[in-house]
Image: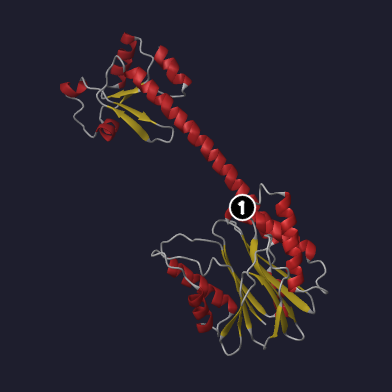
Amino acid sequence: MRSLKQFDKLTALPFGISSNTVEQHAQFAKNHELMLPLLADPELKMISQYTGSKRFGNFSMAASRQSFLIDPQGVLRKVYNPVNIFTHADQVLSDLQTLTEVIDQLGSLQRRQREMQDSITAARRIQQSLLPDLSSIENSSGQIALMFEPLEQIGGDCYWVQSNSAQTWVGLFDCTGHGVPGAFITMVLLSGLQRLGNNLTHTSPARLLEQLDQYLREVFEAEQDKFSSSGAEGVLVCLNHQQKKLNFASARRPLWVQQPDGMIKETKPQRRILGQPSKLQQWEEQSFTLSSGSRLFLFSDGIPDEGNPEGFSFGKHRLKSILQHHEQVSLAELTSKVRSAIQLWREEAIQRDDQTLIAWEV
């Protein structure tokens, strides 16, 4: 009786099963004042599933007992064979106590995982609400397409656009880290751009990068415990619609320009990081005139850095070759081909980093 109460405290149900009939069990329980539930399996269907034998009915097997410890999910955790009738109850209670503690810990872990997943889902919704719809600029600024592949549900890559009748701004940024930490920095960065980008008529990419750099430094310095070594690479371009003039400034991310002849020219970035101290005093700006039908490519380093099972990187050369080889296809089809090429290259390897590509034809 004492053992049964201890089983109850652990929310466990002990019961017996044998080849005897229901009537035989009832008589046995009455004779021994047994409180334990007994199941009848005269055809040995359940018994054979656990013991692997249907020879339970002979005399030698009848004197042998086996016990099975099964968890709440129906998983067989332990088999007791043979059973010592004098110590068996205490042994099972000890194992059951351990199993209960493990299940409680797993339950706590699962709850934390659900809470973390809920937080990630909420963060993804916030990040997506800050990311612009690139198709909104197509009517005035030409064709544009996006490949956006975060390493996790959310990531450290982000992009930004602003457009009016005179000019269109496009930016791509690769923030420190990925997942939730990286996404948090993208939210800080995009919030800063929304604040700084209210009046773009009298500014330039270099000036805007300078203001964004200062804004990020102030945030990171105020929250050093949260943003230690944080920063962002990025590229900002501004296209004058009438003159087809492109102004460009960048922090460690190149701009690729493909002229109608199909060749791609790389515009080199400055070797500095947004939000981090630098010996360079000024942000540099470059400008050039585009021919109609020119294509611009902005991308994060997660694309050329993508690895395959042998550990080799996808590389800039391979990316450039794909873009040049498919210069006649639409940008939507082009970004799809890049995505497929990366997946084919990666095979069974795990994606290394967030991957973003903006293709823009003016």
Looking at the figure, which quarter contains the C terminus?
bottom right
Q: Is 313 left or right of 77, judged from the image as shown? A: right
Q: Residue furthest bottom?
A: 261
Q: Name the quadrant containing residue 142.
A: bottom right
Where residue 298 appears, as percent x and y from the top left, is 61, 73
Above or below residue 228? Residue 353 is below
In the structure shown, which secondary structural element does the residue marked by tag 1 occupy?
helix
Where residue 225 appears, as percent x and y from the top left, is 66, 46
Q: Residues within 10 Å of mark 1 (few under 14, many from 20)?
A: some
Q: Please name the residue shown 57% across and 61% down the image.
A: 150
Which three-letter amino acid code belongs to the residue tagged 1? Pro
Above or below residue 148? Residue 322 is below
Where residue 94 appears, as percent x and y from the top left, is 39, 22
Q: Is 257 left or right of 164, judged from the image as shown? A: left
Q: Please name the residue shown 49% across and 72% down the image.
A: 315
Q: Please name the residue shown 43% across and 24% down the image.
A: 97
Q: Nearer the viewer, residue 18 or 72?
A: 72
Q: Which residue is mark 1?
A: 181
